[in-house]
Amino acid sequence: MSHSVERSDVIRLIGVRDTPLSIDEVYAAVGAPGAGGTAVFAGTVRDNDHARAVTALSYSAHPTVEHELRAVMEKVAADYPVLGLAALHRVGDLRIGDIAVVVAASCPHRGEAFDACRRLIDDLKARVPIWKHQTFTDGGDEWVGAC
């Protein structure tokens, strides 16, 4: 479905930060009186990737990151009946268990909220220029592009 109305007004919070992220801040940003469902996704740093133990992780972003993130969010807003969207991504050095990304979508119904939230995180990872540098216990390291 596509909504012809300008939908950028539903983008309530967008950012890339080098400080810890708050799930509560993201959830509060998408609140709306007509929302029957709010879906929140938090991505955390895990201690392994593809069966290799991770010891350190750092995220970096291209200077156009917020522009690209806004474009992703505008597309989600055009395709779903969202009442509020929010997305924050962390950059810099993170530890195991730290929150790396938080996204949320509020919609009139829960199914729409789940679908919009999933699309937001999937498109963010596919299109927004953020890169992850991982260091492994075996001494190796790798760069992983989010797009």
Image: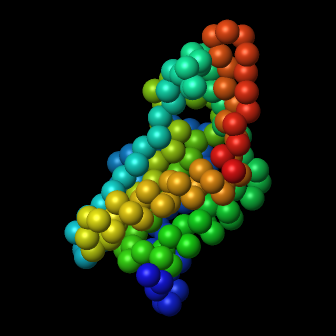
Q: Is residue 9 above or below residue 30?
A: below
Residue 63 quadrant: bottom right
Residue at image position (26%, 64%) is 110
Q: Is residue 23 visible?
A: yes
x and y percentages locating residue 132 in the rendered image: 67, 36
Residue at image position (54%, 67%) is 73
Q: Is residue 55 above or below residue 123?
A: above
x and y percentages locating residue 121 in the rendered image: 50, 54
Q: Is residue 22 visible?
A: no
The answer to whether residue 90 is left or right of residue 59 is left
Quarter that holds the N terminus: bottom left
Q: Is residue 10 above or below residue 28?
A: below
Residue at image position (33%, 68%) is 112
Q: Residue furthest top?
A: 138
Residue at image position (57%, 16%) is 53
The answer to whether residue 107 is left or right of residue 50 is left
x and y percentages locating residue 33 in the rendered image: 25, 74
x and y percentages locating residue 145 in the rendered image: 70, 42
Residue 83 quadrant: bottom left
Q: Residue furthest front?
A: 51
